[in-house]
Amino acid sequence: MKKIVSIINLKGGVAKTTTAVNFAYELANRGQRVLIVDNDKQGNLSKAFKGYDPFNKYTTAYLMTKRDADVSKVIAKTRYENIDIIPANMHLANANMSVMMDMSRQQQTRLHKAFADGGIYDRYDYMVIDNAPDINISIINALTISTDVVVPLIIDQYSMDGLDILKEQLQQVKEDFNEGINFDGCLVTQWQKNDVNIEGLEVIKKSYPVFETKIRRTNAKVQESTFAKIPLIEYSKRCGASIDYRKFVDEWLNEFAK
Ligand SMILES: Nc1ncnc2c1ncn2[C@@H]1O[C@H](COP(=O)(O)OP(=O)(O)OP(=O)(O)O)[C@@H](O)[C@H]1O
Ligand SMILES: [Mg+2]
């Protein structure tokens, strides 16, 4: 495994899942073997790859709760040769609660143990983890194994909310479990070139690293692609957000995966 990237923000609706889908898709497009992990009980990433089953017992929830979990049971194929997925569904809500109540095994390293036991780290080039708008035990598990953290955000009055808390949590994970984790940067999504966006961006840049590439707001096409269950980059190659996501992958590879 070259890199494990967590897509994360405590705020909802900032394009975490859209970023995870297109990031993974574009890496696979470039010949990389990618495992995507849905770490959100909403299951939106799973839905994006047509794999969603609300009754599936073999999901991230199973990895979090089952002692000696067999990771091969949870890995599903997608219609893309180079992309496999570990899906999620509502079972993750209960799983998080039962992990919190079960102190008999370490709570923060359940995913790591399942992946290490199952030889997952040798089978893929990249892992991309889509997280819930939250900071819960399954997210701590994701951070414990991540080499990189990408934080999508929309520039508005609330965009700074939660970033400090996220940074603190990262620091904690760094000290306790994962010295190598790196906050790569914030990725501005739904970008519009107006005063609010331009001024807001300057404020954010004072406190956090921000990727040069910004993902333009591209109405209709992004929503259509979610209904079609096809990654935007495939659904509409030439729309603004697709061009930007490819550019973002160039920037990220150049900066963090050399
Ligand atoms: N560049 C874009 N232009 C226009 N709409 C976008 C863009 N990116 C994402 N969206 C839309 O914004 C909404 C939220 O996106 P998404 O589901 O990826 O966010 P999220 O952060 O994963 O949300 P949640 O916190 O609920 O998991 C969706 O309706 C999506 O289609
Ligand atoms: Mg999401």
Image (cartoon, helix red, strand yellow):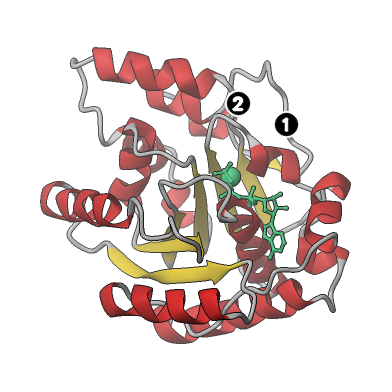
Secondary structure, mark 1, is loop
Could you tell me if the residues under marks 1 and 2 are in contact, i.e. CB atoms within 8 Å? yes
Position of 67 compared to 22: left or right? left
Q: Which residue is mark 2?
A: 89
Crowd band around label 2 with a 10 angstrom C-alpha radius: few (<14), some (14–19), many (20+): many
Position of 110 compared to 153: left or right? left
Q: Which residue is mark 1?
A: 52
Task: Indicate the position of residue 22 as horizontal and vertical percent values.
Answer: 67, 63
Q: Residue at x 58, y 48 (%)?
A: 13
Q: Is residue 140 above or below residue 190?
A: above
Q: Quadrant of the N terminus?
A: bottom left
Q: Is residue 67 visible?
A: no
Secondary structure, mark 2, is loop
Q: Quadrant of the C terminus?
A: bottom left
Q: Nearer the viewer, residue 26 or 191?
A: 191
Which label number is shown at residue 152? Answer: none
Position of 13 compared to 82: left or right? left
Crowd band around label 1 with a 10 angstrom C-alpha radius: few (<14), some (14–19), many (20+): some
Q: Is residue 212 above or below residue 53?
A: below
Q: Is residue 191 visible?
A: yes
